[in-house]
Structures are given as C-alpha cells and as structure tokens.
Image (cartoon, helix red, strand yellow):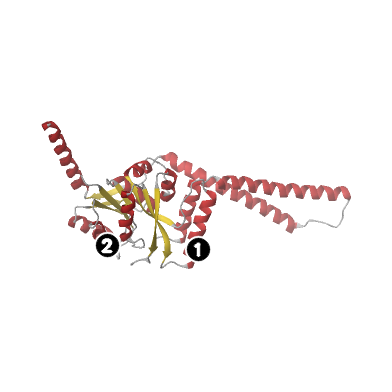
Amino acid sequence: MAEMISIVVPCLNEQEVLRETNRRLLAVLEQLPLKFEIVYVDDGSSDATPDILREFQALDERIRVVRFSRNFGHQLAITAGLEHASGDAVAILDADLQDPPEVLADFVAKWMDGFDVVYGVRAEREGETAFKRGTAKLFYRLMGKLSDTEIPVDTGDFRLMSRQVVDALLAMPERDRFVRGMVSWLGFSQAAIPYRREARAAGVTKFSLFKMMRFATDGVVSFSTLPLRLATWVGFAASGIAILGILITVIERLLGVEGLVKGWASLLVAILFLGGVQLICMGIIGEYVGRIYGESKRRPLYVVRERMGFQARCAATEMTGRARATAAGKR
C-alpha cells in the first residue's frame, strides 16, 4: 500500500492567494510517488476564504477543511491540522506562498532517505523590510543564547515530519505552543533544506508588530527559565547599589562631611530606579505565572465550527479495514 503525505495549510483571510496556492500545491503533489491529502485550517477568516475552501473540497475529495469558530492563532491552527492529518508524513505550509510549495519535493526526498524531520532554512528573504529581517535575526540569535534547546537559525514552521514525530508532538499538551521549538526539543534525525523565501503572492501579512512580539515572548518563555534568573540577578544588582548608597551615607556621617546634601532629585531617582526594577521582575514572574494559570484551566486548544471532507476519508478507511478483515477470514 502506497504511503501518504498530508499537507497542513493554516489560513487567515487569504482569499486573494488561496486559488494559486491550491493550484501550485496540487501540481507539486501530483508529481510525487505518494498518495496525498491537503488539510486546510481556516483560523476564523472574515473574508471569502471559507467559501473558497468549500469549493476546493467539493471538487477534490483529497482536500479536507477544518474551520475554527473564531481566530485562535497560527500555532493552534497548525496543531489542529496535525491532529486531523492522517499521512505517514505531514508537512506544514503557510497559504501566502512565501514558502514555495515546490520545495516539498526536496522535503519528501530527504524523508524517503530516512530523516524524521526536514525543515526549510531561509537563505534569502524577498519582500521583507530591513526591520523584519533584523528583528528575525536578533530573535533567533537571542533564542540560541537563552534556550537549552537548539533551534535552527532562520527557520520557520515550513517543514515535513514523520508520523512518529507528529504523534510525539501532539502528545505535548501545552497551550502556548511554539511549534518549531517543540520539534527541535523532540530530537529525532533532522535535515535542513536551504531555499529562497519569496514575497507574498497577494494580500497582506497577518502578523502585526504586537503579534510578532507575543510570538517571540512565547518562544523565549516556553523554552527558557533564564528570564527568571535574570530577574534575580537584577534584584541582587539593585540591592548592591542600595547597600553601596547606605555605606556612603554612613561614612559621610562618621567623617562629618557637610555640604553634600542629597536633594529631592537624587531621592526621586533612587525611588524610580528601585520601583522600575521591582515592576520588571514582577512582570517577568507574572508572565510565567499567567501561563501556569492558563494551563490549569484545561480548556480545549481550539473549537471547530465545521469539518469538510473527512467523511470520505473515514469511509475509505472503513472499506480498507473490511477488505483486510475479509482477506484474513479467507486465509
């Protein structure tokens, strides 16, 4: 029985580019020596994306669609796609065509050579501002310094994983998910494929500056406790400065030094400095405590509004099971 590959495509308001994405995906997948399915995950789109996906599924039974009840976020859309994928290998591809579908052929070749994870490395990045490239480079270098898990530089979620890796990834229950870091943490045999990242084919990016900062925070907090240790170090440094100030004041009094009156300005600076340090440390601790609180509520990661195309897959699986049972009975 031929092996199957699943392609997970998270979507959010991608009506301008979705038809081209589907066309290029099918052109690539139909050339592979594998069966395939495409699992589109609509992350609460407010444009015509759901209608286009419904049209795709009606025309091609190899296409599945999962629609969220609202926007739950890119990483949870990826997670939902992985949970609904049934392939022996699963690839992740964003719908905006910045990661070219044609690279999937190279991913599959590496997987068939025995690698469990094949990820794309962005050798070139077209259509991105200098600010975006600079902050991305800074983020990955910072993660390399802070995290105990080595996360490859200049990578995204564009990757292929074997079924064993996908099952291990889905067994990790955390809510604040940083998929590329989680896959690196799992280990297994991994290979890199350099590629040229293209500009968006159409539409606009859905990652605002706030979302990028939130995503970066998820990556740092999920894979490092160094910020907590940093808060402790800053606290010790502030305490050391305060003790130094106390010693200077005592020495001045003992020596009878006059005329060195510390006015309101110096007092205000000291108060603001210590207050700022305390608030920063409380914010760092609060970030971790907030995540503990979120995990303790045990809410589902996402809510599905509609599924399309999975009935046909279930029926095919059931028929295959019956055929196997019949063959076993004849033996």
Q: Secondary structure at mark 2?
A: helix
Task: Count up the numbered dots.
Answer: 2
Q: Residue placed farthest to the left in the image?
A: 330
The x, y position of residue 221, in whole percent, is: 50, 48
Left or right: 2 in relation to 163: left
The x, y position of residue 38, in whole percent, is: 26, 53
N-terminal-most mark, 2 or 1: 2
Q: Is residue 60 above or below residue 228?
A: below
Whether residue 275 is visible here, answered yes or no, is yes
Q: Residue placed farthest to the front in the image?
A: 113
The x, y position of residue 254, in whole percent, is: 87, 47
Asked if the residue at tag 1 contacts the one at tag 2, i.e. Cβ–Cβ closer than 8 Å, the answer is no
Give me the C-alpha separation between circle 2 and circle 1. 30 Å
Q: Secondary structure at mark 1?
A: helix
Q: Residue placed farthest to the right in the image?
A: 256
Mark 2 = which residue? 24
Left or right: 244 in relation to 43: right
Query: For the N terminus, which image quadrant?
Result: top left
Instruction: Tell me which corner region of the image, top left, top right, bottom left or bottom right, holds residue 40.
Output: bottom left
What's the amino acid at mark 2?
Arg
Crowd rating for badge 1 (residues with CA inside 10 Å; few <14, some 14–19, many 20+): few
Left or right: 20 in relation to 137: left
Left or right: 79 in relation to 220: left
Instruction: Tell me which corner region of the image, top left, top right, bottom left or bottom right, holds residue 27.
Output: bottom left
Crowd rating for badge 2 (residues with CA inside 10 Å; few <14, some 14–19, many 20+): some
Q: Which mark is residue 6?
A: none
Query: For the C terminus, which image quadrant?
Result: top left
Whether residue 92 is visible here, answered yes or no, is no
Mark 1 = which residue? 134
Residue drawn at (85%, 49%), measured in percent from left and top? 253
Q: Is residue 209 above or below residue 1?
A: below
What's the amino acid at mark 1?
Gly
